[in-house]
Amino acid sequence: MSEAVRPFRIAVPQSDLDDLHARLAGARWPAESPGEGSTRGVSLAHLRELADHWRTTYDWRAAEAELNRYPQFVTEVEGQRIHFLHVRSARPDATALMLTHGYPSSPAEFLDLIELLTADFHLVVPSLPGYGFSTPLSGAGWTLSRTARAWAEIMRRLGYPRYGVHGGDIGAGVSGAVAAIDGDHVLGIHVVTEPLTAAATATFIPGMADNLDESDPVDKLILDRMAAFRDEGSGYLAIQNSRPQTIAYGLSDSPVFQLAWIADSFEAWTQLPVDRDRLLTNVSLYWFTGAGSGAAHTLYDQAHSSDWGGPVSAPQGFAVFGADETVRRLVPAPEGTHWTEFAHGGHFPALEAPADLAADLRAFFGPLS
């Protein structure tokens, strides 16, 4: 196994950009039932506007240059290429912190957060296996725990004997698994969530909802949200958990399909406005790298795995966005756990409320450094 960590710079060929614009210009659009709006998925008017902006106004080269402002590297772990940003603080004694994105996201999620953290942290921001420039996917089996082992190996190669981990969504699961696998080196784990994500997670994580009582109004709200996710909100997951190869053809061939697939989730899961160009940078990373296919296959692998990580002994911190009283019922936070609630924000707080997230990361990791 090569342990080489090699510099990397994003340089999408102009032919790929021209191909994207041609495909968007020649897109075939479906009919939409009158009056349906977004009740059956992302609305036609919204998606056409986004696609037109992507083709005519959005500047990929500017986004590429912004990403390339930060030192980037690739390394190979267990045969899988892993891409990551490595942004060192001007402070030699700064805390090392690994930021892991979730689905359907990428390191671009953290662009507004990086500048807020570099005074206090050396940042390592990887692309999950099969996502972004951690492509192509080397094979099956990239579950949360396998990814966590790769993350621990990357931090070893970078020479960090102690480091913190942070994530949301899949990134929260990977971060928890890193803390379980590499507990001797992890100084703390910080995760973000929000009420709908917590309820959705409870539908497939064994034990999370075992003690809920339907006669209790808070528990009833959780159970109703879990039912709504199973009945109406989990279609994107169900198809990727069962037929990732089938959906990969559409995600790889049609930029409109890839755009709709991601925009639908952003529309449903955010509470505060997300900059349109930030969204399109994320979608562009999926399109240019073929990450839609890789992401689908890793979701399939995790759905067919019984490994959801192990016990964590490192200090834990939680930041709940769009908070209500349901999350505390679902998340097993030990006494003394760092717990912060924000009334605003949703599934992507690094995009929706980066200043609040940065402040909470400093508050949690500061005493641990």
Image (cartoon, rainbow, N blue to C red):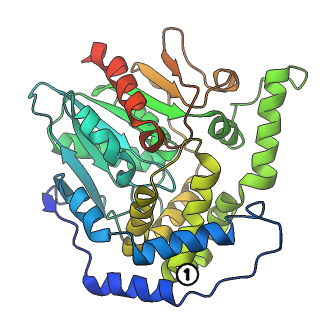
Q: In the rendered image, which quarter contains the C terminus?
A: top left
From the top left corner, tell me how far across and down residue 261 is, in percent: 59, 66
Can I make out residue 361 in this image?
A: yes
Q: Residue at x 75, y 81 (%)?
A: 31
Q: Tell me the SS state at disc 1.
A: helix
- Callout count: 1
Quick one: 50 or 3, which is closer to the camera?
50
Can I make out residue 137 in this image?
A: no
From the top left corner, tell me how far across and down residue 273 is, in percent: 52, 46
Q: Quadrant of residue 367?
A: top left
Judge whether 265 appears above or below 21 on screen. above
Q: Quadrant of residue 204?
A: top right
Q: In the rendered view, does 188 fall on the left or right side of 40?
A: left
Q: In the rendered view, does 176 fall on the left or right side of 87?
A: right
Q: Residue at x 50, y 77 (%)?
A: 255
From the top left corner, tell me how far across and down residue 225 is, in percent: 77, 39
Q: Residue at x 37, y 72 (%)?
A: 289
Judge whether 237 appears above or below 155 on screen. below
Mark 1, residues whose alpha carbon is within 10 Å: few (<14), some, or many (≥20)?
few
The amino acid beneath tag 1 is Tyr
Q: Quadrant of residue 266?
A: bottom right
Quick one: 308 or 299, which is closer to the camera?
299
Judge whether 171 appears above or below 161 on screen. below
Quick one: 114 or 245, which is closer to the camera?
114
Q: In the rendered image, which quarter contains the N terminus?
A: bottom left
Q: Residue at x 44, y 21 (%)?
A: 316
What residue is pinned by disc 1? 249
From the top left corner, tell me how far across and down residue 39 is, in percent: 78, 60
The residue furthest right is 215
